[in-house]
Amino acid sequence: MSDRPRSKALPGILLSLSALIVGFLLGMWLGSFNVSKADGLAGGAIVLAWGLLGALVLLGGAIALWAAAARRTLWRVLIVLGPLALIVAGLLIAGFLRQQEEGRRQMEEEMRRLKRPTAPAAPLEFLPVSGRAATEGAVVMGLGMARPDLTAPVLHFLNGPDATEASDSLVLEQVAHGSSIAQAPPWFVPAHLKLDYDILLLRVLAVSRSAVEVEVNGPQRMSRWVPRDQVQLLLWPEFLLGVYALEPLDPAGDPLRNKPLDHAAPITLPAEALLHPTVVRGQWMRVTTEGPEGGQVVEGWLRWTDGERLLVRYDLLS
């Protein structure tokens, strides 16, 4: 009786598993070169797709070899490729762990850099508070206001939207009644400052994906960029809806009207009426009045901008 041929299942399965593992890891390694920081969360999906592609390619080759080669040939190939597969897998895993550790180290270094105040800095002596002064003295309208996080230890100033190193900083500290400015550049003159009411506002001039250009000294027309994640961006409609009251700069030329139209009938305001914004629609804002106690409440539309400048002055506090 002749000997039956021995099965190729065991070496074929081992070869396929080796090809699957190595193909997946090799594909992920190649995929990592096709991912940039701008891809964000999608980068992980791209690397995974490359890993699956590599696994399928090498698995297909292993299955084809399994079907065509003799059992002894499979064992010979496995004896050579098996240890090589383990070495490749080990190197790829070690490289991946090194990349993870390097990324963690860079993130920790970045966090330490953001918390580190920069020099030079000087004690702050005088800052404006009045919303009216900031409105009338502004050379450019800007896009709105930026509100720094007063609980953060430092606000960094950058020289450009793509800069990674801070050129100067505003140092904040927590005191009994809230926040206080410990140190600031000598040129720092924000649009509004009243820290006992948690008010620190900077006029926004431009916005990028990662930074905001703010006016740091209106009289000198000086601006700096700040990291976008260190401030709250308030465009003019949102900012003006949050103020206490406002009034037109030119009541005769821009009166309160019964509709948001230039030719709509004007509305006579009660004496000493306060205008409270409720709705913004394009260049118009619906406001309600608060006159003397017991006085009639009036509602109308006020043109707040002509597209190039603010047409209203505002009060942040009552």
Image (cartoon, grey):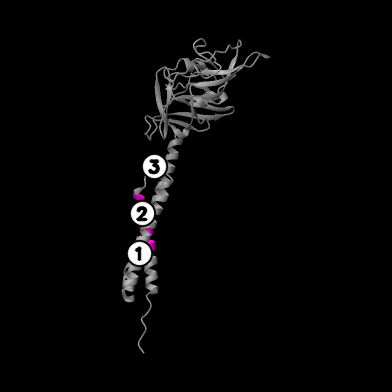
Between 61 and 201, the one nearer to me in the picture: 61
Disc assigned to residue 283: none
Disc 1 vs disc 3: which is toward the camera? 1
Label 2 sits on residue = 29
Separation of residues labelled 2 and 3 (CA atoms): 18 Å
Numbered range of the magenta stretch: 19-33
Q: What residue type is labelled 2?
A: Trp
Between 208 and 271, the one nearer to me in the picture: 271
Q: In which quarter of the image is residue 178?
A: top right
SS at mark 3 in the image: helix
Q: Which amino acid does label 3 sit on?
A: Ala
Q: In the orientation shown, which residue stands out farthest toward the bottom?
A: 1
Name the spot of residue 272 as percent of width and height, x first. Answer: 60, 11
Separation of residues labelled 2 and 1 (CA atoms): 19 Å
Label 1 sits on residue = 60
Please tell me how crowded label 1 is: few (under 14), some (14-19), or many (20+) other residues with Cα within 10 Å: some
Can the viewer see residue 77? yes
Quadrant of the image containing the C terminus: top right
Q: Is 22 above or below relative to 213?
A: below
Name the spot of residue 126 as percent of width and height, x first. Answer: 48, 18
Residue 189 located left or right of residue 31? right
Of the numbered discs 1 and 3, the one sitting upstream in the chain is 3
Please tell me how crowded label 2 is: few (under 14), some (14-19), or many (20+) other residues with Cα within 10 Å: many
- Is the C-beta separation of discs 2 and 1 under 8 Å? no
Label 3 sits on residue = 38
Disc 2 vs disc 1: which is toward the camera? 1
Q: What residue type is labelled 1?
A: Gly
At 38% across and 56% down in the image, what residue appears?
A: 51
At 36% across and 64% down in the image, what residue appears?
A: 59
**SS assignment for the magenta stretch, majority:** helix
Can the viewer see residue 90? no
Separation of residues labelled 1 and 3 (CA atoms): 33 Å
